[in-house]
Each structure stands twice: as C-alpha cells, then as structure tokens.
Amino acid sequence: MKKIVVAGQPCAPCADCAVRPHAICAALDQDELRELEQLGQRLRYRPNEPVFSQEEIATSCFNVLEGVMRLYKLLPDGRRQIVGFALPGDFLGIAVNGRHGISADAVGPVKVCRFVKKSFVRFVDERPNVLRRINEFVTRDLDEAHDQMVLLGRRSAEEKVATFLVKWRERLARIGQISEITPLPMSRQDIADYLGLTIETVSRTFTKLERDRVIDIVHGGIRLADAARAEALAAA
Amino acid sequence: MKKIVVAGQPCAPCADCAVRPHAICAALDQDELRELEQLGQRLRYRPNEPVFSQEEIATSCFNVLEGVMRLYKLLPDGRRQIVGFALPGDFLGIAVNGRHGISADAVGPVKVCRFVKKSFVRFVDERPNVLRRINEFVTRDLDEAHDQMVLLGRRSAEEKVATFLVKWRERLARIGQISEITPLPMSRQDIADYLGLTIETVSRTFTKLERDRVIDIVHGGIRLADAARAEALAAA
DNA sequence: TTTTACGCTTGATCTGAATCAATTTGACCG
DNA sequence: CGGTCAAATTGATTCAGATCAAGCGTAAAA
C-alpha cells in the first residue's frame, strides 16, 4: 500500500516531542504513539492568526507544541471574554455537538499538532487509556474554569491581576519555563478580557502593584518582586 | 454467597428510575444497569444540608434524582461564588486529585444515588462506553462554564438576571418540568452569588424587569411574560 | 532620520452596582 | 391569632471601575 503524503510538513517524530510528557500523548505506548504520529500534522500559525472559531464545525483537534493561544468567546456586540490561554501540552478542540464552543487564535508564533477529528475519535474510541487521559484534561479544565468564575464574580481588580500573574508564572514553571522575569506575551487588552476588566484598569493596577513593590514591570513581562504579597492577594 | 445489606434504604430499582434517560446511566445496557444498581445507594438530604465540601477527600460520587443542589466555592473571607445548580440527571463528584474542587448542598429536599468512588471507578474503568458518557457530561459542563465566564466578566446586571431566568427555564423544560410559571427554589442570595451580584441588585433587577413587563414575580418563582424580550437581553 | 502607528499609561469624570440602612413581607409557631 | 425571625424589597449614599480624553514610548515603515 502506498503512503499518501499530505500537504505541509510531515509530522516530526513524536519520539522526541518536547511536550509529550505534559500532553495527552503521555498516555500512549510505543505502538500507539507510532500510530497517532500518522494521524497528526504539524502546523505553524503567525501572531494573531485564527486557528478555529466559535460555531464553526469542528473537523480538527490540536495539541499545542509551542507558543501561546488565546481561547475566547464573543458576544454579538463585540464584547469579548477570554476563557483561557493555551500553552504547550494543552489539547484543544473537543466540541460538544460537533461545533467549537470557543474561538482560538495564536498570540505569538504558534506550533501545533493537528489531528483530523474523525480519525482521532476513531483512534481514541478503541483506546480507553487515551480516553481516560482526555477525561482528566477536561476535568482539570473544568476545575480551573470554576476557579476563574470565582475570580470573575467575586474578586477586586487588584486581586484579579495578582492572581493572574501568580498563576501564569506557576503554569510556565510547570512546563519548565522558569526564569526571573515572567514573560507576558499577551497584550493588556487580552489580560483585561481574561479578567473581566478594561485595559485602563489593568494598566493602572499594574502600576499600583509596581508602586507597592509587589512587581517590577519590564519589557514584555514582569518580575515578581514580592511573591509572598502577590500570593496573599491571590489567595485572600 | 450471602448478600450484605448496607445501612439506609436499599437501592430502588434503576429499571424505573425517572432520571435515567438524562443521566450517565443511559449509556448502560441491562447487565451493566443491574451491576451498577448494586453499587448505588439512595439517600435523601434536607434543605440546606451539605452533601460534600471543597477540599474534602472525594470518596463518593452522586447522581441527582430529585431536587436542586447548589455547587459553589468559598473564598477564605467568606465570599461565595455559586458555579452551578445541579438538577435531576446531573452527575457530581468527579474530582481532579482525589479531592472535591467545589462544595455542594441541597437547596430544597434532595434525593441522590450515591456511589462509593472506588467501586464506581472500577466499574467505569472496564466500560469505555460509560467513560465516554461521563466525558460528554464533563465536556458539556465545561462549555457551560465558558458561557458563565462570559456572563460574569462581560455582562450587565440586567443581562445577567435575564440570561439566568431564560436558561433556568430551558433547563427545567429539558428535564420535563414545563409550566407557565418558572419555579425558583433557590434564594435571592443564591442567585446573587451565581451571577456575581449582590442580593439588593438582584432584587432591584427583578423589580425592574417586572416594571418593564418582561416578567411577573410570583410566589416562589416568576412568569416569563415577554419571552422574546428576555431572550433578547440574554443574547445581546 | 522622520513619520506613522499602535500599545500602553495617565488623568478627569461618570456611572452601575455595592454598601449602608430601613421597612415590608411572608412563614412558622406557641 | 399575634409574635418572632428570616427573606426580600426599597431607598439613600458611596465607590470601584468604566468611560472619555490626552499623551508617551517603542517599533516598523518611508
């Protein structure tokens, strides 16, 4: 049987995929990995390029390999709520009724591993261990969504920003990106739309946190100067 | 082999369980149903009685059979965010790391089918069809959580209340509870904590919607007088 | 280099919802 | 039936964050 070569780059070997331990793929054995490799296709997206859209029929799902994506919902009048940021290892595109519930686009340059939904579903359907792993991911996402509801519904602007910074730093650390300064690749508007604030309030709150010696604002990110105080604001 | 009778009522036959078609149990065949029946135990809770608590080690999971439950998170200083209301057919208690992420208590009188986590997990582990069903449920919950984030982060008090009323009515309809007046078994404080508002704002907004002839406030609920206008507020 | 432009910050003002403070209503109970 | 208590409504006032309106800086285009 002749192998059909799809357009685009061939799927680089999963064997040395950097995100595998964090991704759903960690649940796969050697054979499964090799099989899934056939189904996946690596793709790049430029900054701000859309990956999929709310309401659109979901034909693909994705593993994020590199970069950051924003996941959001739009109201008819244009108001936007970012429901999360996706990082390497995150799995996207599980839809409820065949349609994407959210939109996703690249924040900076992004690399993903794309799967055709149909074949991916078939692959998962005969592998309960993968299904279990996906279930863990969705359950974790739901738990985080609950936390975000508390944030949106019950916390002040200062608490929102501090919580965001602390959690963002922790997330980066978990995937191995530890450094003195915490990069913030998303815009102030993105942060505002994630926290249910305006861009002005986010900016003012950053300034206030810096004045209070909790953070230093550096180009493209922040330095958490007083982690204890930031965590206190985040917990309270 | 002698059957051991556990304390409490014996599990009534799943065969004529009213919520089965809406619950995860709809994925089960005759044999599975009979087996799960052995694992489940029916329990009642009085109004406002806690069922499980945030941080508590999750030893049980639950199918709601009758009544309404509130699911919420508390901040250390007592601020509360209700993340959802559970209705008959809903499945509760899937925890991320063995601990409940949220607290749950009965709003009015509640009947549930309780499963010991350990045996339930064992049951599910060898039945991919059930796992798939649970996955659908969690995915749907996540999608609804995203909608709720938009509500909390980006909508006005009036939009919040109107959306809540419209969606609550739809949910009741979906499980067969259709009637001219929409019952609201939860308190105004519950509604406030669900919508990220104060009790006063909820009350004022109800009054305003009544003044504007969108709803009639009746004892223990509301009548949706102008469904079109309410849905417009909910969509916008 | 200047120009344009966009993202971010800062300031002044406004406003929707919170807070504070009484009533009012309704349910339960001796 | 009145008395008690909690839930809900209503009113007066305050305030956190939104809105409106300039500026500022950095980066890419000309």
Image (spheres, coloured by chain):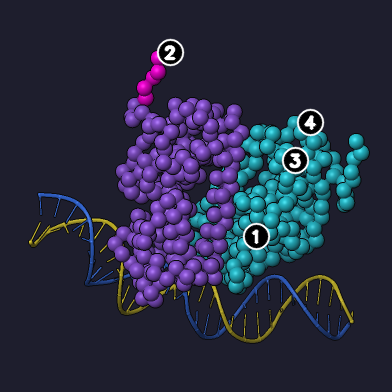
Chain colours: A cyan, B purple, C blue, D yellow
Chain letter of disc 4?
Answer: A
For the residues labelled 4 and 2, the Cα–Cα distance comes to 43 Å
Write down the quadrant of residue B222 in the picture. bottom left
Mark 3 or mark 2, whichever is nearer to me: 2
Crowd class of label 1 (few under 14; some 14 to 19; many from 20; radius 10 Å): some
Span highlighted in magenta in the image: B1-6
Residue A193 appears anywhere in the view: no
Marks 1 and 3 in Cβ contact (< 8 Å) = no
Quadrant, the N terminus of chain A: top right
Which of the two marks, 1 or 3, is nearer to us in this view?
A: 1
Residue B205 shown in magenta? no
Q: Which mark is residue A55?
A: 1
Q: Is residue B2 magenta?
A: yes
Do badges 3 and 2 share one subunit? no
Name which residue lies at 57% across and 40% down. Answer: B133
Can see residue B187? yes
Kindly report the secondary structure that dominates the magenta region of the rendered protein.
loop
Instruction: Name the amino acid, label 2.
Output: Met
Q: N-terminal of the two: label 1 or label 3?
A: 3
- Viewer-proximal residue, A80 or B62? B62
Image side of residue A52 versus residue B73, left or right: right
- Using the image, determine if residue B22 lies above or below residue B177: above
Three-letter amino acid code at disc 4? Asp
Residue A20's disc number:
3
Q: Which structural element holds mark 1?
A: loop
Q: Determine the residue positioned at 79% across, 52% down.
A: A111
Label 3 element class: helix
Q: CA distance from mark 3 to mark 2?
A: 48 Å
Left or right? Give the position of D25 relative to D1. right
The mark lying in front, picked from 4 and 2, is 2
User: Disc 2 marks which residue?
Assistant: B1
Q: Position of residue B56 (x, y in %)?
A: 46, 39
